[in-house]
Structures are given as structure tokens and as C-alpha cells.
Amino acid sequence: MSALGKEVAGILAKRRTGDAIFLTAEEVDEILSGLGVPLGGTKAVPVPLRATRMHFRGTKWLKPDHPDAQGHPLVDPADLPEWIRPTGSTGDGAAPEAGEHTGPKARVPFHFVWSPQPGVNGIGSGRNLRGKSTLLNVLMWSLTGRCPQFQNDVRSWIEHVEVDWQVGAERLRVDFDAVNGVATGQVVSFADTGSDTRSTVLGQFDGADFEGVMGSLMMTRLRLENIPVWTDTAARVHAWPAYSSSFVVRANQLDPIVGNEQTIGLRMMQMFIGTDWAPVQAAAMTARRGLDKAQAAAKDKADAAGEAVEVSRRAAEKHVQELQAKIRNLPPGTPDVRVMLNAATRASDLARETHKLEAKLIAQTSLAGTARQQLKTLKARAHTGYEDALAARFFHHMRPSVCPRCAAQVTPERQAAEPDKHECSVCTGELNLEALQADVIVAASVPDELVAGLVARTSNGDDGDSDAEEESPDEVEAAQIAVTAAEAAVAELTAEIAALTTERDEAAARVEAGSGLLSAASTRRVLELDLARAEGALGALTRSSDPKAVDPVDPVRLAVVDTAEQVLKKWVKKDQDPMLVKISADIERLTQSFGADNLSGFALNGAASMALRENGVRQRYSGLTAGEKLRVKIATAIALIQHGYVEGIGRHPGFLVLDSPSAEEMPEEDLATMVKALQDVANEAEMQIFVATRSATPLVELLPEANRVVAEGNSYVW
């Protein structure tokens, strides 16, 4: 039975009636353990971490005109290592990069050895790009197992690294070969046994597993605990990479105030302060957020399901309404199949009769046409004879006075001479004497039958017209009677066909109406079945229109972990608040000793947020300038270390790297003030601090020779 389990069980039992949960402390412990929440706090005792020796070597590949290349052999580009070889130097046709030297390079071997000391160690140079950051990068590479952001040429130059670390009472050596930033090596532990030193290989690595090996070794030895946090979607555990990154303060990475991981600044502060229950609180909060996430996901799923059901229900309602409308629009009534069949038979018979009559009509129409044509021919012939008689009587009684062709005058003498000379007074042709006696002027060359007709028509005078008309009255009358009879037969057939067609159409209409009713009845049966199914689906969707979320979280488990989180929050606050007051006072003292005497009234709260006053005006850490932030962040890191070693609690190993603090508007005199203050702090509390800066003078003036590596002027650190 844990103290936490007992406290949680007591609080749950004291809830108001209806909400009380009665569990034993053992049952609470079981629930918390199942959620990954430790049952007891751990005493945080700082374990010192110190770098005691660093050595790295390799080969610089320099242009022939570089000052350090003098006296070193030149190597043809084709013989250079692949990762050193300039682009296009092997005949692959690639163009060299801008500014890239494609000729031979000088091989310049190098090696660097230094034994940093406890307290403050300085790395300085008179100019930038002289190798300061390389020393820090090699140091952190060996500690974290992660290759830092070297310059490309420097990364390719380093071939071997050895760094000795003192972790508490244990001495470790991280020893590896490097090929363009990829490390292969081992971690060895050394133990002194009398006059002998015994070594034990603790871990080996080849490339990407370097970081994992260092994390597993260092987390255990430094007594650091994993930091569980809940991100937006899942639980995440921060371990060695987060801790090791917090050992470095860089001028270009000043947020948050503790560590370099924005999401875990609070947790990192709690871990370094060293309250016993801080890791348990982090685990409880992560577990509770995990349960909240599961509940929210279940609710979202239920809401989505409910929305989907509602959409389906509306669609089902619409489908039912459409089917009902279709049924309403169907014609009413039930078809009489016997009547429909009789009508169909009658329509078929009438169609056949109509077809026969139409054939007769075609024949009769043809006969009528023939009769009309014959009548027309007879009438035309009679009319022609009549016109001929009129013309003969007219033209033979003419007495032309001039020739119709040449317009020569026909004289009275010539006209009078016709009976004597027997010549036509116009054409002087010989006349027929017999016709002439009958007063008919006709040439002797005209056939006798034609002459006889002319004489007869002429001699008849006016009676000739009626004779011509009566020449064939029987034929015309008979033809007229035939036409009348034929047209009457056509009209009779047409009327009979029209009557049959009307009767046939009426029978067909009765058949079509019956067929429509029959089809409607069939369609109605289908629609009624569809409607029944649709109404059933609508009823089912209506009953399930508000699906309930299936809560995947046991409410008892949630209540236990939520209560545990609240209990732990109070316990951590109770232990932490007095420490924060002391730490805030140390931060203020240190910040002012670093030259920022305009800042005062520091208050670091439990949310890892800093309130202070700037020239007496309220201010927050986020509102400070970069130079002020840098001083405050360094002071905070040192205050946490100092607190741990003075109070004998905390988890910070006392190892700190300050990279280029003078880059943020820090004049040389302020840097000297900071270095002196750091020395004073290091004398009060056991720690090791590395300061890398371009301002080398304060390092030379304030630090012992063993505690510094300084390249003055244009010289290089290594």
C-alpha cells in the first residue's frame, strides 16, 4: 500500500453521495500501476558529470595556398577519399560547386589533446571560425551520441575521437572512429584495482545506434528518469536527448528558460529542482490525458456515427415520400381482363376488314380515275370538232385583201376572176370546181374526203354547230355516268373505312386502357413492396438516430488517475515552492553579477515562467532582450545546479556548456564579469562549465592555463 494510493482512496471515498467511489489503497495502487504511474517518489541525488580528457585527430585537406599547407604533400583529386573529393574530379562529368577547389589538396594531419579541469574552462580565439565550436561539438558528440552540426569540411576531417568522462565515481571512455560524421566504436569503463586498471566494454555502436548506447548508459548512471508528456495525439517519452541538450546554452537558442525543448520546459525544471514526486506527477498527467484522448475519440466517433445516422434517416424519409408520391400518381381501378381480350380481338378483326376495304378503295379509286380520263378525252374531241367547223366556215368565207405572208394586195379583179380562172385570188392555186360551185374555196390538191366534209359543213350553215355537238352524245353521257358511279363507290368505301377505323380505334383504346391499368397494378405491387422496405429502414434509423458513445474508459480508472494527478500537483507544489523562492534569489544575484543590474525581483514559478522587474517595471522573461535573456538563462541553469549541490537534491549533473555568450551584445568587460562570477559559483558548488567565446582576453586573464585553450590573433584552436 503506497502513500499515494492511500491518499487517493481516502479522497474518492469522501466525495458527495452518489459520486463516492470506495476502493482500497491496494486497488488504487493496482490501477495506477496499470496506467504506468509510479507509486512512490524517488529521492533525487545529483551525480557529477565531468569531462577529464578529450582527444581527436584526423587530416585536414587544404588548398595549396593555405598558410597551414606549407611543407605538406599535395594529393591529386582522384586519390582523395570519396567524401573529400571535389565534385567532377573523377570524370563523372558533374560541374564543380561554386568556389570549390578542384585541383590537388595538401594533406595536413592534426591531433588535439586537452584535459579540462573542474570549475570554469575557457575556449577562445581572436577571430571567428578558428575551431572553438569544434571542441564543444566533439565534446557533445561523445556525450550524446549524436553528430552535431559541424561545418562540412571539419566533419570530413575528423577521423578518431576519444573523450574520458567522470560519472560519479566511474570513469568512462568514449572511443570511436569517424567517417564523414558516422561513428563506429565503443564505450569502456575503467576501474582501478590496486596498481592495475581494469577495463570493461559497456557498449558498442556502429552509426545510428550511437545515441541509443549513450542514452542507456548515461540515464542510469546519472539517475535521470524518463519524462513522459502528452503531445497532441499520443504519449511521448523524453529521455537522454532532451536532458543532454539542456546542458548547453547557446546564444541563438534562448527559449524556454530551462532546457532547449519548448514542450518540456516545465518538466525539465521540475526534474532539475529534484522534488520527489515530480516524475510521478508527469506520469499521472500523461496517463490522464491519454484517457481523456480516448474518451474524446469515442465521443467524436459517436457524434460522427450519429450524424451519419441522421443523414441516412433524412435520405430514408425522402425515399419513403418519393415512393408514396409514385403510388398516388398511378391510375385507380382494376383492369377487366375478359373485356380487354374481347376488345383486342374486335380491334384485330376490324383492322383486317379495314385492310380489305382499303384494297378495294385503291382499285375503285383507280377505276374512277380512268373513267374521268376517258370523259375528259371524249369532251376534248367533241370540242375540237366544233372548233374545226367554226374555223372552216370562218376561213372559207374570208375574202383577204392582202397576202398574209408578203402583204401584196389582193385586187378585186383577181377576186372576181376566181370563178372564171379557177384560181385562188391569194395564192393563185388551182381550185376544186365542184367545191367552188358549192361556194367553198378549196385547192384542187386537197383530198376528196376532206373536201366533201368542208362542203357539207359549209352547206349546212348555222345548223352545222348543233350537228357537231350532237355527233357523239351517247359516248360522253355514258362516260359521265361511269365517272359518277365510280366516285360514288369511292365515297362509299371511304365512309365505310372511316367508320371501321373509328370503331377499331375505340377497341384499341379500350385495350390500351386495360393494359395501362394492368401495368399500373403490377407497378403498384412493386412500389408497395419497396415502400414497406423503406418504411422499415426509416423506422430502424429513427430508433437509432441518437447512438450512444461507447466509453472505452473505465470511469473508476479515470477518477483514480485524475485524483492522483491533483494530489501529486499539491505535493509537488508544496515541496517545490520553497525551493523556487531560494532559486529565484540565486538567479537574481547571479544575473546582476553577470552585469545585468537593471533586473531585479525575480520569481520563477511552478510553470517554469519567470516574472521580474526591469528598472522597477514589471517584466517577463519573454519580454527581455536577447542579451538579457542570455544572462538570465545562464543564471537559471547555474542556480539549479547550485541548488542541487547545496541542498543535496536535484538531478542536474553539474555540467554546463556556454556557447558564444558574447555574441549577444555582451561587451568584453561584462564577459569578464560573468567569467569571474562563474568561477565564484564553481568554488561554491562542484560543477564544470565550458565557455567558448571570441573574446579571448578575459579567459587569458582570469583562467589558469590548464583551464583554457586560447588561439590569439589569427591562430587556430587546433
Image (cartoon, rainbow, N blue to C red):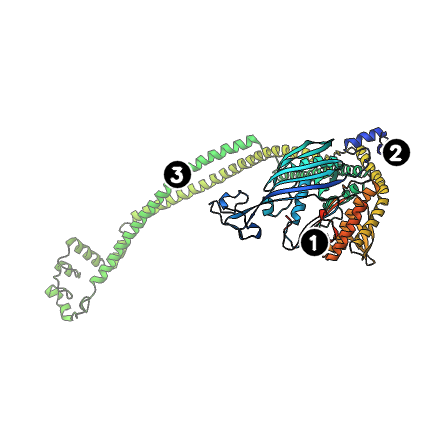
SS under mark 2? helix
Locate the N terminus and report the quarter of the image it occupies: top right
Amino acid bearing label 1: Ala
Secondary structure of the residue carrying tag 1 is loop
Report x, y in % for residue 132: 66, 49
Task: Give me the residue at 56% from left, 52% from top.
Answer: 66
Query: Which label's residue is closer to the chain start, 2 or 1?
Result: 2
**Dot 3: element:** helix
Query: Where does label 1 land, which residue?
Result: 696
Q: Is residue 410 left or right of residue 581?
A: left
> Which label lies toward us, 3 or 1?
1
Q: Which of the two labelled residues, at mark 3 and mark 2, occupies the earlier sequence position?
A: 2
**Where does the image place residue 498, in percent across and percent down from the top left?**
46, 41
Against 34, residue 474 (above or below) is: below
Does the rendering let one see residue 511? yes
Residue 10's disc number:
2
Residue at 41% over, 36% down: 356
Q: Nearer the viewer, mark 2 or mark 1?
A: 1
Residue contact at pointers 3 and 2, CB within 8 angstroms: no
Q: Does 413 appear above or below 550?
A: below
**What distance separates the C-alpha of mark 2 from that of mark 1?**
62 Å
Q: Position of residue 674 (x, y in %)?
A: 76, 53
Q: Is residue 238 visible?
A: no
Q: Going 73% across and 41% down the picture, which residue do you hit?
A: 50
In the image, what residue type sits under mark 3?
Ala
Few, some or many residues within 10 Å of mark 1 (<14, 14–19, 20+): many
Q: Nearer the viewer, residue 498 or 18?
A: 18
Dot 2 alpha-carbon crowd within 10 angstroms: few under 14, some 14 to 19, many 20 or more = some
Nearer to the camera, 139 or 462: 139
Please name the residue shown 86% across and 42% down the image. Answer: 574
Disc 3 to disc 1, how far (Cα)? 129 Å
Number of the label disc, if any, that sits on residue 359: 3
